[in-house]
Image (cartoon, grey):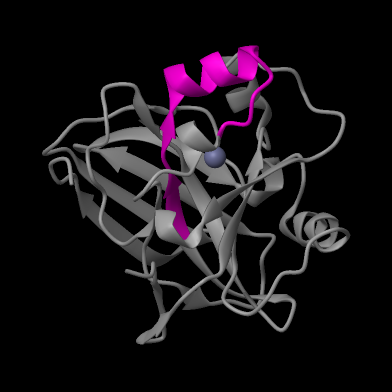
């Protein structure tokens, strides 16, 4: 089955998801990573895309991220997404200098809510609540690399085609989650709420 996302009522099939790692200083600090000298980029395949949030494993972390849908080489729409990460496995792979697809590119590892059209990409921010408790807050102003810089850097070596998705990195506050948890994510443009997402964590698929 092909992974799809929804934009303006239409089902779209992204060929890939390009993710930025280490784009918020506080998240770099919480994982004790170094600030990268160049942009950290990695891919999630179409097969990792899901609309539902599943419990994956005990060491699996959520990372809520402002996510962009690309049309004609430009940002056409935005949604909140979850970059699911098997943290212990990722650490083990990183330590050995190995690729981290096993920790990041598994089935249902890229969860997206519905995309909405936007013109302005530099004033977006979000809040993620789990079971009513605020866990993450992200602002485009606090990103090390801003959305347009990210697009430019990716496009310098890899083509972005229509319906591809770019995930812009996660702020601090990542963590584990369990079956039955309720995720409530709010997307704002400046102070204005523009979209809300609710995911109830389903059992292992
Ligand atoms: Zn991430």
- Relative height, residue 77 to residue 42 (above, below): below
Left/right of residue 13 with respect to residue 72 in the rendered view: left
Q: Is residue 98 magenta?
A: yes
**Nearer to the camera, 200 or 60:** 60
Query: Which residue is pictured at 84% across the width and 55% down the height?
Result: 153
- Relative height, residue 9 to residue 165 (above, below): below
Query: Which residue is pictured at 67% across the width and 32% down the height?
Result: 22
**Does residue 21 appear in this view?**
yes
Left/right of residue 91 with respect to residue 112 in the rendered view: right
- Count the labels in the image: 0
Q: Quadrant of residue 182?
A: top left
* Rendering coords of residue 154 (x, y %): 78, 57
* Rendering coords of residue 71 (x, y %): 65, 81
Which segment is the magenta one? Answer: 80-100
The quadrant of the image that shows the N terminus is: bottom left
* Rendering coords of residue 49 (x, y %): 40, 59
Q: Quadrant of residue 95?
A: top right
**Does residue 167 appear in this view?**
no
Q: Is residue 136 magenta?
A: no
């Amino acid at each position: 089955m092909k992974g799809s996302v929804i934009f303006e009522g239409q089902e779209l099939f992204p060929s890939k998801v390009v993710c930025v790692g280490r784009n918020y200083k506080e998240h770099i600090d919480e994982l004790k990573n170094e600030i990268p000298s160049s942009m950290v980029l990695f891919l999630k395949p179409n097969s990792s895309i899901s609309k539902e949030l599943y419990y994956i494993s005990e060491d699996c972390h959520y990372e809520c991220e402002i996510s962009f849908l690309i049309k004609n080489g430009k940002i056409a729409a935005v949604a909140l997404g979850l970059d699911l990460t098997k943290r212990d496995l990722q650490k083990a792979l990183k330590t050995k200098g190995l690729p981290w697809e096993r920790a990041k590119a598994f089935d249902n590892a890229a969860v997206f809510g519905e995309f909405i059209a936007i013109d302005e990409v530099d004033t977006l921010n979000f809040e993620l609540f789990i079971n009513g408790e605020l866990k993450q807050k992200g602002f485009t102003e606090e990103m090390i690399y801003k959305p347009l810089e990210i697009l430019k850097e990716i496009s310098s070596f890899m083509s972005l085609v229509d319906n591809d998705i770019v995930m812009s990195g996660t702020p601090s506050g990542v963590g584990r989650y369990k079956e039955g948890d309720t995720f409530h994510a709010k997307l704002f443009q400046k102070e204005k709420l523009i979209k809300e997402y609710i995911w109830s964590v389903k059992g292992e698929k």
